[in-house]
Each structure stands twice: as structure tokens, then as C-alpha cells.
Image (cartoon, grey):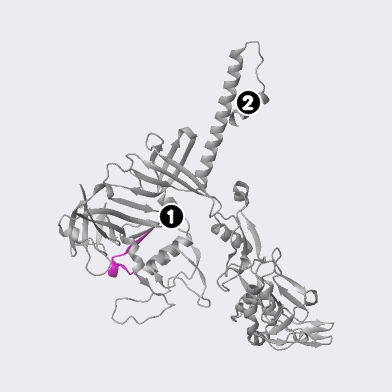
């Protein structure tokens, strides 16, 4: 018989104690009890119980808690049903640690008067933080963040935390920003990608990789400790190449003498508009891409209208990304009035089918057509049917264009320039092993060094396929993080890898525990070596069989040579 402890919680989140109403539920159907744990993502239980008229059964309601193996779970989805004159309730309950999503930690970014409620904003005094930017990266430790978020939560929620193992400091964007308790844990797991969150009730434990994965001397041999093993590749999410775009800086345009006739674009920010438009050079034309403007990644591709709309958006001007709709967002001007930011339309009024943007009175920039990329051309190369000026853009540019004689001093407007030019980066080792898998641009508003940008990109890449290595465990206690030696003799496969997922049936006499093992490069390489060894063994045995058969059939016949063996081998394969 399966028995679980049920607690009716009074008040706020806490581990149940003697002040709560606690009862023993004795009507759980043993084979339905299931506990699922997946590293950093899932921890829950589910079961089905029948109505035996007990107080415990009546407590199977949302918000109450269930205890199994010393861990408490909060009931989320009880479902009552009736069948064969029997009432049952199916329960899904999540681990109590997931309830930290109900807790809101407020940073200095959101000063608030909490009145009589027992809540307080947090101070950012753990580490000096600059508030100059909404996206400030700060060097912090995992303990800094946990101490800031949960260091004084114990009195209110009974929360404690542990940092287990060594964590180097990392640059984290806004580490002390307001968020839920779950946001705080996610912030740490994103910054320290090898970290593992494995709680013990409301003791929030953050493990370093080498502290979580431990060799306890366990092994699993196919057909001895497990009767089912599956090994599956999935390259869907692989990324081993991308364009890297780092931080920008404001730089002065300087002054200088232009010795020839030139076009001056006024005294405004024309150079900024030109620089912004040119940063999209070489972005491929893709019809319908780039929308919604401001949401879609422009570097994935744009068409003619979404490109012009994107440049305007970069300066806070919202115009549609469809040529006909854009016509009403400007007034027509003559060809000789054209200046930076003006829009050039192709086709008739009310039925325009293409658009470009002027960089100056002589040059335009545009997305030409499928198969080409964003580029600049002389306006005379492909002159628009008519030109329009948007007044908001004209204010930014700073006035009408004018032609002056030589010896005019160029303007000194500042413009944004990259600390290093955007560049294409490939994980060559991954490419050599699996081929090229390109991803979206990897960007950073804070990284100013090219080598640091490469190092950051390597943390964002997914250079190896996901590998699903699952097995059933026969009379074997699966432990999260256990480093297990796995051997599949028929496949010549031996590896050691960690347990990252468990689906257990603690009270069932028929269902076996399913274990998911860590998907790492070593696991993959061990499997490939096993395949190669198996193939070599097959070839050797085939060769020996052929040679022996020929020798036995005729003592006078000469032994087959290597070419004949391979030919026979290939004929059998086909």
C-alpha cells in the first residue's frame, strides 16, 4: 500500500510543520505514483487516489502539499472523476521550490512604498553598480546574487540557500534587477551555464558542475542492470557559426577641408542616419522579412520597405513597412531637394512597388531584389519615380541640402562606430565534425574586445547535437548527478556520463525507473568509437570467414586477395 503525507497549509509558503493540519493518505493507487526530475527544468509528482472517506482524501485540493521521500510538493492540478461506482482524484504536484516564482524581489530599479506589508526593496550595495545604462554588465559571483535575493528571506518564507562548489565571477547584465525568485535562479543558470539547481525543499542549492556530478562507483550493463537502451541524435538546435556584433561608441566626425564642390546635409545628425543605414549593408533581401519592425532581427533579412522602416525606427520614427502605406508618411519634393533620409518611390502614386532611401543628394541605399543584398548606388543608376520627405526625419537630419563651393569645412557631428567590425565566427572543430550550422547574429552592447566576443560566442553556440541516451534501471537507485559507467556490449559501447533526468515509480511493482543520461561530447565520441569498432569487427570476421571457406572448399585454390574479399563483402551488403 502506498501512503503519502498531506498537509493543509495555513498562510504563506513554508515547509509544513506542527502548526499545519497534517494527515496520512492511505488510498493512493501504488502503480500511479510517479516522480519526475529533469535537471534545471522539472521536479514534480503525480498519482491517483480513491475516495475512502478519509479527511486526508478531502485535503487533495490546490495549494495543499504532499510529501514523499522527505520532499514536499504543492498540489496544482487535482482532477476528480467517477468510474464503476468509485470516485478517484488524479493529482499533479510541483516541488515546493518552484513556489519561489510567487516571491517578488524588488531592486533599486523599482523603489516602492510597501506600506504595512512585510516586504522591502533590495539594496545593490553587494557590488558597486553603475546606473548609467539600463543594460549594465557587472562582475559578480553566484553568491552575490543569491545573498542579495534570498539572504534575508528566511524569516519570511523559511528559505535558505547554498552555493556548493567554486564559481568564478562573471559579467552579468543587471544582476540585481527586480524579478521573481525563479528569475533569480534563471539569471544564475544563464550566467554559469554548467551550474545545476537541485533544491532540498526550500533550501535552494546551486551546484558547480564538478560538485553535482560524482562518481559513486555505479555501473549499468545492458541486459544485466537494464533491458532497454535508446540512443538518439538531434541536430535541430545546433549552432556553430554566426556573425558577431559587439558594442559601439560615439566618435566625433572631426573637421576638414573639402577641396571640391560638395553637398552639405545641414547642421543636424545626417551622419548618424547614414551610419545607421550603412550598418545594414550586405543584409540579404528576403521578401516579407524584417517585420514586425523593432521585433524581428533585421540581420536575418529584410525587403525594401522593411529596410527603410527599420532605419526610421532606429531614430524613434514609426512608419509602416509597406510601400503604399508609406506614401502618406511624407510630402513630395523635387529631385534637386533630396537629402539624407528622404524616401524614393517606384511606380505610380497609390500603387508604388519599391522604395529606397537617400544617403545624400547623389547616393541612395536600398534592398534591391531577391538574390541580392542591401547596397548603395548612385541615384542616377536607378532613379525613383518620385521623392518624399518625412518631416520627423528632416528634423533629425537638420535642414535642407545645399551645394557650396570648395574649401567648405565638413561638419563635426558625432556618430556611432563599432569598437571592432562585425565579423563571422565559426567553431572549426564542430564544423569539421558535424558540418556548418549557422545561427542568428550574436550581439553584445558591452563587449569591446574581439577576442572576448569570440569567447562569449562560444558560450552561446550549441556545437554538438542533442543526444538522448535513456535506459530503464532494474533494481538500481537512480541518483541525480550520479556519474554512471554504461556498457552496451553488443554495440562495443562504453562511456561514463551523469544522470540528468529520472522518472521513478517508487511504489510500483511493475513499472521500472527511466533514466536520462547527460548529453555531452564525450558520450557522443564514445558511441562513435563503438560504431567504428563494431564495423571493424564485422569486416574482420567477414574476411576470415571468406578466406576459411575458400581454403576448406579446395586445398588447391589460392586464397582470395583483398580486392576479392571487399567485392564479396559489398555484394552481401547490397
Q: Quadrant of residue 39?
A: bottom left
State if disc 1 and disc 2 touch (CB < 8 Å).
no
The residue lying at 44 percent from left, 52 percent from top is 209
Answer with mark 2 or mark 1, whichever residue precedes in sequence.
1
Whether residue 85 is visible: yes
Along the line of sight, which residue is nearer the eye, 349 or 410?
349
Image location (x, y in percent) of residue 121: 37, 76
Image location (x, y in percent) of residue 186: 43, 63
Mark 2 or 1: in front is 2
> In the rendered view, does 533 fall on the left or right side of 397?
left
Residue annotated with mark 2:
568
What is the C-alpha distance between the residues marked 2 and 1?
A: 54 Å
The residue lying at 48 percent from left, 58 percent from top is 193
Along the line of sight, which residue is nearer the eye, 29 or 113?
29
Q: Does the magenta stretch include residue 161?
A: yes
| Label 2 SS | helix
The residue lying at 31 percent from left, 50 percent from top is 34
Q: Indicate which disc residue 208 carries.
A: 1
Amino acid at each position: 500500500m502506498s501512503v503519502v503525507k498531506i498537509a493543509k497549509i495555513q498562510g504563506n509558503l513554508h515547509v509544513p510543520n506542527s502548526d499545519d493540519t497534517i494527515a496520512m493518505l492511505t488510498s493512493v493507487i501504488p502503480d500511479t505514483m510517479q516522480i519526475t526530475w529533469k535537471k534545471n527544468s522539472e521536479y514534480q509528482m503525480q498519482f491517483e487516489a480513491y475516495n475512502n472517506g478519509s479527511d486526508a482524501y478531502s485535503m487533495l485540493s490546490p495549494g495543499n502539499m504532499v510529501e514523499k521521500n522527505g520532499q514536499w510538493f504543492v498540489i496544482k492540478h487535482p482532477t476528480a472523476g467517477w468510474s464503476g461506482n468509485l470516485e478517484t482524484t488524479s493529482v499533479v504536484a510541483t516541488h515546493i521550490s518552484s513556489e519561489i516564482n510567487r516571491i517578488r524581489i524588488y531592486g533599486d530599479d523599482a523603489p516602492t512604498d510597501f506600506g504595512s506589508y512585510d516586504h522591502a526593496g533590495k539594496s545593490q550595495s553587494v557590488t558597486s553598480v553603475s546606473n548609467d545604462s539600463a543594460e549594465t554588465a557587472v562582475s559578480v559571483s553566484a553568491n552575490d546574487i543569491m545573498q542579495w535575493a534570498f539572504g534575508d528571506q528566511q524569516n519570511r518564507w523559511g528559505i535558505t540557500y547554498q552555493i556548493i562548489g567554486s564559481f568564478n565571477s562573471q559579467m552579468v547584465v543587471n544582476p540585481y534587477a527586480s524579478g521573481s525568485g525563479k528569475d533569480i535562479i534563471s539569471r544564475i543558470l544563464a550566467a554559469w551555464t554548467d551550474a545545476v539547481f537541485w533544491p532540498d525543499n526550500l533550501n535552494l542549492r546551486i551546484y558547480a558542475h564538478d560538485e553535482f556530478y560524482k562518481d559513486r562507483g555505479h555501473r549499468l550493463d545492458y541486459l544485466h542492470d537494464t533491458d532497454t537502451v535508446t540512443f538518439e541524435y538531434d541536430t535541430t538546435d545546433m549552432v556553430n557559426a554566426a556573425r558577431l556584433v559587439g558594442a559601439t561608441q560615439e566618435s566625433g566626425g572631426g573637421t576638414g577641408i573639402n577641396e571640391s564642390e560638395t553637398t552639405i546635409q545641414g547642421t543636424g545628425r545626417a551622419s548618424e542616419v547614414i551610419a545607421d543605414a550603412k550598418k545594414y549593408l550586405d543584409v540579404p533581401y528576403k521578401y516579407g522579412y524584417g517585420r514586425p519592425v523593432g521585433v524581428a532581427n533585421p540581420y536575418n533579412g529584410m525587403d525594401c520597405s522593411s529596410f527603410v522602416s527599420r532605419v526610421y525606427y532606429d531614430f524613434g520614427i514609426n512608419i509602416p513597412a509597406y510601400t503604399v502605406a508609406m506614401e502618406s508618411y511624407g510630402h513630395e519634393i523635387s529631385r534637386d531637394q533630396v537629402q539624407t533620409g528622404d524616401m524614393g518611390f517606384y511606380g505610380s502614386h497609390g500603387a508604388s512597388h519599391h522604395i529606397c532611401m537617400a544617403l545624400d543628394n547623389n547616393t541612395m541605399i536600398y534592398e534591391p531584389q531577391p538574390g541580392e543584398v542591401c547596397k548603395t548606388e548612385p541615384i542616377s543608376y536607378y532613379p525613383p519615380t518620385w521623392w518624399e520627405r518625412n518631416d520627423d526625419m528632416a528634423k533629425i537630419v537638420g535642414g535642407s541640402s545645399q551645394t557650396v563651393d570648395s574649401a567648405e569645412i565638413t561638419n563635426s557631428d558625432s556618430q556611432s562606430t563599432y569598437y571592432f567590425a562585425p565579423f563571422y565566427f565559426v567553431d572549426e572543430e564542430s564544423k569539421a565534425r558535424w558540418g556548418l550550422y549557422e545561427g542568428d547574429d550574436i550581439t553584445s552592447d558591452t563587449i569591446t574586445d574581439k577576442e572576448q566576443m569570440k569567447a562569449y560566442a562560444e558560450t552561446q553556440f550549441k556545437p554538438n547535437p542533442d543526444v538522448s541516451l535513456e535506459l530503464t534501471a532494474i533494481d538500481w537507485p537512480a541518483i541525480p548527478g550520479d556519474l554512471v559507467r554504461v556498457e552496451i556490449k553488443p554495440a562495443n559501447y562504453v562511456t561514463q556520463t551523469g544522470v540528468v533526468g529520472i522518472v521513478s515509480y517508487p511504489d510500483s511493482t511493475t513499472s521500472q525507473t527511466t533514466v536520462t543520461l547527460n548529453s555531452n561530447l564525450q558520450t557522443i565520441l564514445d558511441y562513435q568509437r563503438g560504431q567504428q569498432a563494431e564495423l571493424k569487427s564485422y569486416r574482420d570476421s567477414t574476411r576470415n570467414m571468406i578466406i576459411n571457406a575458400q581454403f576448406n572448399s579446395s586445398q588447391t585454390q589460392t586464397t582470395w586477395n583483398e580486392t576479392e574479399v571487399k567485392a564479396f563483402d559489398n555484394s552481401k551488403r547490397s
